[in-house]
Amino acid sequence: MPPVFGSIESWIFDLDNTLYPARVDLFALIDEKMGQYIQRLLDVDSAEARRVQKRYFVDHGTTLAGLMAHEGVDPHHFLNFVHDIDMGRLAPDPELNAALAKLPGRKLIFTNGDADYAGRVLAGLGLADAFDGLFDIHGARYRPKPHPDAYEDMCSALDVEPQRALFVEDMARNLKPAKAIGMKTVWVNNGSEHGNAEASPDFIDFETHDLSHWLTEMMENAGQ
């Protein structure tokens, strides 16, 4: 293991657009469901619903956080509705799955989604049994990444020592709080919507366009 990674005990991964490429566009299906939800909730047309959705996402970290803050939405009702999608777009990535299996230490998921949805995604990726723990939006008390408290709560819940952890994310801004508490950070710059917002070398240690390749290369170098 290269020296910079030798002290890593906890390998923490975001879920959507990180463990699978952004081009899979699972969010297109979720976006459609969010639009339907907001249209019914606010009695607005599709254009206004999308404007509200994206404004809340940018301002609050997730559309859900904005809807809770401004509209008093029940998070369980919202998540059950928008995550009721077909996972047929997902497929295992043998290279990624093999690299994950070789990582030493614990492998964890830190997601702004919920555990039920995350389980379905992981199953679709052939990773149902690949991780040792998961921290979701319910555990974060609906304060999504990049809210600093979400990172503190995740570390407490999963017994993570930040200085011995590495966090992998497709949303650059979500790496800043991780770096602030001592984690190594990896930005998967693969074209996610708003993924490059606020990106800065100040809090990004490594950048890759392909997580499978990055992990595989790192593990191969560890064997040299």
Image (cartoon, rainbow, N blue to C red):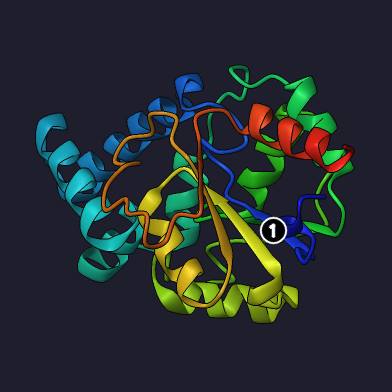
Q: 181 left or right of 61?
A: right
- The quarter of the image holding the C terminus is top right
Q: Residue at x 79, y 60 (%)?
A: 6
Res. 95 in view: yes
Please say if 26 is above or below 147. above
Q: Position of residue 98 (x, y in %)?
A: 84, 30
177 on left or right of 46: right
Residue 103: percent from left, percent from top = 83, 47
> The disc labelled 1 sits on which kind of residue?
Val
At numbered mark 1, what does the secondary structure look like: helix, strand or loop?
helix
Name the side, left or right, on which 52 lies relative to 75.
left
The residue under the point 39% across, 26% down is 28
> Percent position (x, y) of residue 115?
65, 54
Q: Which residue is mark 1?
A: 4
Crowdedness of circle 1 by 10 Å Cα count: few (<14), some, many (20+)? Answer: few
Q: From where the camera sits, is residue 142 visible?
A: no
Q: Who is closer to the viewer here, 46 or 88? A: 88
Residue 124: quarter of image: top right
Q: Quadrant of residue 117?
A: top right
Q: Give residue 89's quadrant in the image.
A: top right
Q: Looking at this view, is 120 or 200 the one in front?
A: 200
User: What residue is at 59 percent from the left and 57 percent from the top?
Assistant: 167
Numbered disc total: 1
Q: Position of residue 176 (x, y in %)?
A: 40, 64
Above or below, comparing residue 149 to residue 138 in the picture: below
Task: Pick whichever, 192 or 6, lies toward us.
Answer: 6
